[in-house]
Image (cartoon, grey):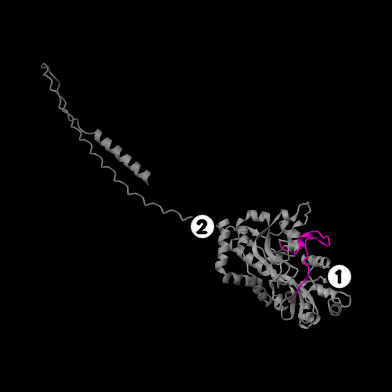
Amino acid sequence: MKKRASMMLALLAAFALIAASCGDDDDDATVEPAAPAVEEPAAEEPMAEEEPMAEEEPMAEEEPMAEEEPMAEEEPGLPGEGVSVLAGRANWSSGYFQAELYKLLLEELGFEVSNPADIELGPSNGYTAMALGEMDYWPNSWYPGHLSWLQNELPDGSLVEDYVTIVGEEMIAGGLQGFLITRSFADEYGVYTMDELNRNADALAAFDASDAVPGNGVADIFGCPEDWTCDDIIESQIAFSDWANIQQTKAGYDAMFAQAVDSADDGLPMIMYTWTPTAYLTQLRPGDNVYWLGVENVIDDSNPLGLEGGEAWSQLGPDGQPVNAKLAAELCPAAADAADGLCQLGWIAADILVTANNDFLAANPAAEALFDAVTLSVIDVSLANVAQGDGEDPRDIAAQWLSDNRSLADEWIAAALAAA
């Protein structure tokens, strides 16, 4: 507009100069002496003096045009728009809630996230799938137990750890784990540690009479499926502590658990590996139908079976000392005899964390920031598992959790958007 007004002023000034150059001369004419009389031709009548041109009226200034309102700035799109994500989940049901929760959070950032149930894997295949780009992230890692899977060698000779990263603090020390034993059997035989069972001939005979493989001369305890890592840790614990009279049963976890519940409810001997947060402890209830079982020695990094990655299965803390659980003697009778009054379960509480493909993280900083921001409470995840056990869909449980914890979720989303 300023440029247009300047041009108008310049035109008006030019018109004014033209008008001034057309005015009369104000000087008087000089009188000359008369010339000798000469017969002159008849003088032509003087031409009528032209009337001076009327000065053109200056052009009226154009009214300045109304300034155009600036166009509203287009809001930036969400960082995940147009990005497809391959989500995965563990093949144990206690991890389904977290898988659905991360899916919903990523969708709020605009990502198109696959159904985690489509890529349900145990750790033996899950970490390799992430390294190969066949799964972008997995929210069900258990460390330190799963550290050995990072050493898996790929076809080209590289290692899984070259392609994946552990992200965030989803549930630090959230995975309390250990062995449960039928309470009535433990009280009858005074068996409150695995070592006591291994040494007690009468207890072993009673146990063997009704366990998973009756009459084979050993106590068959319920462990883990073969692709979960904990099966290898249990085998290593048996070797490390020289529990020669104890043997692990490996099968589908839920099938073993159902058999364990029946035995505990009937007062029959059984030992079952389990963990938190899960709904399992609503059926095998420490202090009610079961106890937590102690151990006398905690496995270190000596890898007694010489298995690949076995050095990572130490259950000692960073300082090389056992990390014992604050469980009352009513829940873990072995704590009553401990100098510190704590229960030595033989397992360090696991950090449950997200592991993700490096290329995915590099291309999607908002997703990485989200993974880094999310923290969950063991209580919330346990309650979610109870609801799941009652038949609710994990996705519906996760959606309800987000609704109930909207302000916290908004903080996570804001952190992710800020990193985009």
Please give the name of the residue rendered at 76% of the width and 63% of the height, measured from the top-left corner. 314
The single residue placed furthest to the right in the displayed view is: 216
Give the mark, 2 or 1, whose residue is nearer the N terminus.
2
Left or right of residue 370, residue 46 in this image: left
Q: Can residue 111 be seen from the camera position used here?
A: no
Q: Which mark is residue 244?
A: 1
Residue 321, x across and y down, in percent = 73, 64
Instruction: Name which residue lies at 60% across and 71% down.
Output: 401
Seen in the picture, residue 49 relative to 63 is either above or below; the reply is above
Q: Nearer the viewer, residue 170 or 191?
A: 191
Magenta region's main secondary structure?
loop
Percent from the top left, x then y, of residue 380? 63, 72
Q: Please rate how many residues cluster around mark 1, counting C-alpha atoms within 10 Å: few if below 14, some from 14 to 19, many from 20.
A: few
Residue 125: image quadrant is: bottom right
Q: Is there any visible trace of residue 6 in the rendered image?
A: yes
Q: Secondary structure at mark 1?
A: loop
CA separation in Å, label 2 and label 1: 68 Å
Please provide percent x and percent y for residue 324.
71, 69
At x 73%, y 76%, the residue is: 336
Query: Is 37 a magenta residue?
Result: no
Q: Which structural element holds mark 2?
A: loop
Q: Which residue is the extreme one toward the bottom?
A: 266
Few, some or many C-alpha atoms within 10 Å of disc 2 (few <14, some 14-19, many ≥20)?
Answer: few
Residue 417 is drawn in which quadrant?
Answer: bottom right
Identify which amino acid the numbered label 1 is placed on: Ala
* Closest to the observer, 190 or 219: 190
What residue type is disc 2 on?
Glu
| Residue 75 image label | 2
Q: Which residues are magenta?
A: 292-317
Residue 344, by quadrant, is: bottom right
Mark 2 touches mark 1? (CB < 8 Å):
no
Residue positioned 76% across, 52% down in the render: 158
